[in-house]
Amino acid sequence: MNSIKSIKYPVKTPFWASWLWPAAYWRIKTTQPELYLTFDDGPHPKFTPWVLDQLKQADAKATFFCIGKNIQRYPEVFRRIIHEGHAVGNHTWNHTHAFHTSTNQYLREVEQTDLLTGSGLFRPPYGKMTPGLYRILRKTHRIVMWDVLSGDFDLRVNGEICAQRVIHYARPGSIIVFHDSQKAWPRLQTALPRVISHFQKQGYRFLSLNAGN
């Protein structure tokens, strides 16, 4: 269904979601014209450099939630993310589904990826964690969720729809999800430049997430 809304997942995170994981960050509390772009599932040798080029041209910063095995495969791309002043976070070693993995195995993947990212930021793949994992990880990581989901992973929509979703729902402090991945690329290449251009014309800045937020 080509719509800014979706019947399968919420584009705009419902207000009650934060009640489930109150220690997680769903958006940054601010009234300033600031937005927080995040990119999941990289680094990728083709799509992450393209994203970095877009951000550099716009003087924008972002946060990349990286998969450990992809950091291992493409260390030079990961180093470029750091070198250009963006933040990085942990997205597990194998993009692991918390409901299909033992707690011990999941935590081992998080620890293994932490060794490469050196970051206390964590985003669970698929946005899912068990209550036990949440209780453990909230003590050691800053769990980052989101306010607006672009849906660039959704094969049912096109890049323009993804851009319109973000433009329609984002507000000051929104944490926005894109993906620097093969699956998302057909939509990302249209949506990301549109989103950056639209909000910069409105006077917004794009910032990375860090300990000071």
Image: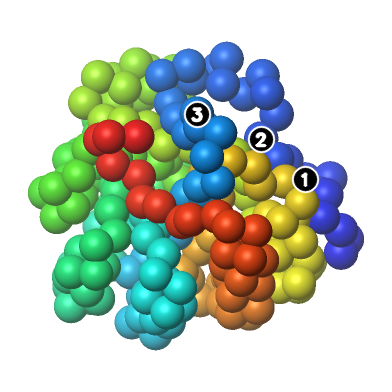
Q: Is residue 42 left or right of residue 185?
A: left
Position of residue 14 in the picture relative to residue 135 (left or right): right
**Residue sitting at x 14%, y 55%:** 116
The amino acid beneath tag 1 is Lys
- If you read the primary sequence from the N terminus, does the residue marked by circle 2 or circle 1 appear first? 1
- Identified at 29% across, 47% down, the residue is 90
Give the image location of residue 99, x and y in percent: 48, 34
Q: Is residue 130 above or below residue 195?
A: above
Which residue is nearer to you in this view: 111 or 84?
Answer: 84
Q: Foreground mark, 2 or 1? A: 2
Question: For the residue carrying disc 1, how many other residues have a C-alpha within 10 Å: few (<14), some (14-19), or many (20+)?
Answer: few
As shown in the figure, which amino acid type bears the numbered disc 2? Thr
Could you tell me the amino acid type at mark 3?
Answer: Lys
Label placed on residue 8: 1
User: Element under label 1?
Assistant: loop
Q: How far apart are the two marked residues, 3 and 2, measured between alpha carbons?
A: 15 Å
Query: Which badge, 3 or 1, is on the more N-terminal residue?
Result: 1
Q: Earlier in the sequence, mark 3 or mark 2?
A: 2
- Circle 2 sits on which residue? 13
Determine whether label 3 and label 2 are within 8 Å by CB: no
The residue labelled by disc 3 is 29
Q: CA distance from mark 3 to mark 1?
A: 27 Å
